[in-house]
Amino acid sequence: MTVKDSSFFLGGARSGKSRLAQQKAEGYAGALVYLATGQAFDAEMTDRIARHRADRGPRWRTVDCPTDLPQAIMREGVPGQVLLVDCLTLWASNLLLADADMAAATEALLSALAGVRCPVILVSNEVGLGIVPDNALARRFRDDVGRLHQVVAATVESVFLVVAGLTIRVR
C-alpha cells in the first residue's frame, strides 16, 4: 500500500535533504509539524538543534519523539497538518541504543504511516554507500537502517535521493 501525499528524502550528510524536505513541506497549506528524533547529548548537538529550530521559523511546531515516532505520527497525522520527520536515521540510532526491537518498531512506523491523514515527509541519511563498518554495532546499525529505508521507500508515494543539494527523483 502506498501512503498518499508522502515523500521520502534520502541522502548523505550535508547533502541538502533536510532543506529540500522543509521547502516541500512549506509548499503545503496547513499547520507545519516537525517530528524531531534528535537528542541533545552534547553541546554540538544542542547547537545543531537550535540552528534547525531557528531556520524553520515561527510557522513550525516541533514535537520531540526520539523513540516514540510512530505514536507521534498517529497523534499528529490529522487533516490540516503537514508532518516532517527528521530523521529516520537518528530514530533508528536511538532505538538501537535503547536495545529496542527494530523490526517491531519498523512495523509500528509502517502502521502509523498507513493511518496518516495528512501529507508526511520523511528524511533519512543514506548509510549504506560507504565501506563496511569495522565493528558489529555499526554493521547492525547500517543493516537495520538499510532495511528500514527499503520498507519506507516501498510505502511512500515519492522518493528523492539528494546529492550535493541536487534532487534525483527515484520514484
Image: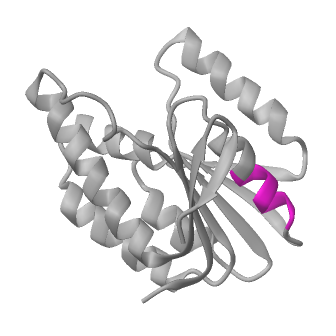
Which residue appears at 34% of the width and 69% of the height? 151
Q: Residue visible at 42% across and 55% down?
A: 68
Identify the magenta region: 21-27
Q: Is the magenta stretch mostly helix, strand or loop?
A: helix
Residue 60: x and y in percent read: 81, 51
Residue 77 location, quadrant: bottom right
Closer to the camera, 4 or 77?
Answer: 4
* Residue 169, percent from left and from top: 60, 63
What residue do we see at 66% from left, 43% from top? 18
Query: Looking at the image, is 11 positioned above or below residue 114?
Result: above
Magenta segment: does it hold 25? yes
- Quarter of the image where one finds residue 54: top right
Q: In this view, does 49 lie to the left or right of 108?
A: right
Q: Residue furthest top?
A: 43
Up-down: is 6 above or below 137? below
When the figure is inspected, residue 150 is found, relative to residue 137, above or below; the finding is below
Quadrant for the N terminus, please. bottom left
Report the residue that reaches farthest toward the left: 136
Give the quarter of the figure containing the C terminus.
bottom right
